[in-house]
Amino acid sequence: MPPIASPQGSRAGLITAVVVFVILFVTSAIFAIYYNTQWQAALIKDEQDLKRLAPAVVPGDMTLPDVATLTARASKRAPMTGIQIALADRAAEAKLITGNPAAPLDNISADVSKALAEVGEQLKAANIPIKLSDDNLLSSIRTLAGQAVTQTQDIAKVQADLKTANEKIVAMTNAEKGLLDEKDKAIADVNAQLKVAQDENMKYQGTKTANIAEMQAASDKAVKDAQVQASAAQNELTKVQGEVRKLQDTVQKLIIRIGHYRQNPTRPLQQIDGVIAKVPGNKTVFINLGEGQQLMPGLTFEVYDQKKGLPPLSAASGNEDTDLPAGKASIEVIRILANTAECRIIKVATGQTIVEGDIIMNLVYDVHTKYNFVVYGEFDLANTGQATPGEADVVRRLCTQWGGRVMDQVNVDTDFVVLGKEPSIPSLGDSPTAVEIDHKDRAQKALDAYQELKSNAIKLGVPILNQNRFLYFVGYYDQAKR
């Protein structure tokens, strides 16, 4: 059994506990009364401070961004308060504006407005078109600074122009002095030459009579010599004219003889280059020409009906733009084989069909002969209505790349002449300009050269083709328009 406490011991413990409780209660009450007193005093002080600050600060001001910024700055610059920092900033701004950190705020605003008004009046009196802001000092300062920079630049430019003008004046003065000196020297030289001429004249007058007699004798002798030379020259001229007539007869006979070896433009051509060997379809044909026969990819042929044969070089009507020698088709070599060549069909005339045995020809191409061509004038290969000199080079290139030769002038060795569009002479108005006159002169020279070349070809019996007849005879008419 546990031991039983005695009544006396229990009473003593209870009394002790009560005493301790009372002491703690009294102590807590004392502390409560003290802190309550302090809190009441602080509350009274805060109310007094609020009443004292009420005219300057209202509760809503504490949420403004500037107040928050001042509070943050005060926390970094302790022990300064936000108001002290604001007052320091105001003093710095007052010093920046007026030079006096203690200047009253109202006086600063009034002084600035007054200064701006005075400056505005001065600018107006000086006829300077600048308007200053009445309520923005920074804007006014920038405006004045900009005007000052502009005027400084203008002054510098004027000074530079003035310097340049002075230099020109000095140069002109020096040049004028030099011209005056040259004039004086020229006058002196002329006077000296005049004196020499006068002396020579006097000397000439003294010897004139003798010289006239001597000149008359020399003149008579010269007339006799000239008569003798004229008679000899006439005899020589008669002899030369006889030789010229003989040469002309010889040339005419040679032209007639050469004409027997040239193609007669009015008769059908005999130059059959090959035939269609096979027509497999798929827009291709094969011809009876192959390797070793001067073929090349890109070479074109005109296809003619085997029964109708080849057309003549010239049109039956005599008009180069009618009765064009269009065949039934045009083909282009794309692959060369041993004994044949594969060709692409460029075009087939309406209602026509390529069959085996149809004949092909290209006026430039010949396995055994290199024909000589003269290409002259302006061409319009694409038929756009605008002929240009540069397209003549395309015709020349076709002649050379397909085995022919290109000559500059027509002579007895020329086989064909290909002429472009005949030059036209522009008409001039009532008051032509120098450019228009020059353009007409150049056009006239081009026409004269064109007609002279054509005339020489006719005299020598050389066949003449225009652009379209040439393109048809080489199977290139449709290719040229692409």
Image (tube, helix red, strand yellow):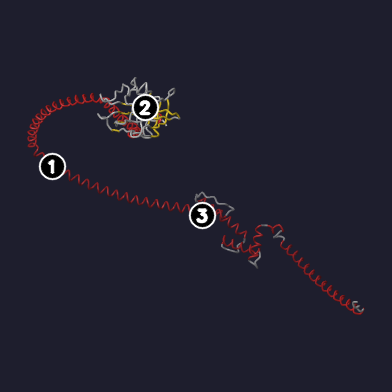
Specify the farthest residue to the right.
7
Report whether residue 429 is seen.
no
- Looking at the rendered structure, the kind of residue marked 3 is Ala
Image: 23 above or below 120: below
- 28 and 244: which one is in front? 244
Q: Which residue is mark 3?
A: 145
Image quadrant in which you'd find residue 320: top left
Of mark 1 and mark 2, the one earlier in the sequence is 1
What amino acid does circle 1 point to?
Answer: Glu
Left or right of residue 422, residue 255 in this image? left
Residue highlighted by disc 1: 200
- Residue 103 location in percent, x, y? 60, 62
The answer to which image quadrant residue 424 occupies is top left
Nearer to us: label 1 or label 2 = 2
Q: Is residue 196 visible?
A: yes
User: Which numbered tag is attached to residue 390?
Assistant: none
Q: Earlier in the sequence, mark 3 or mark 2?
A: 3
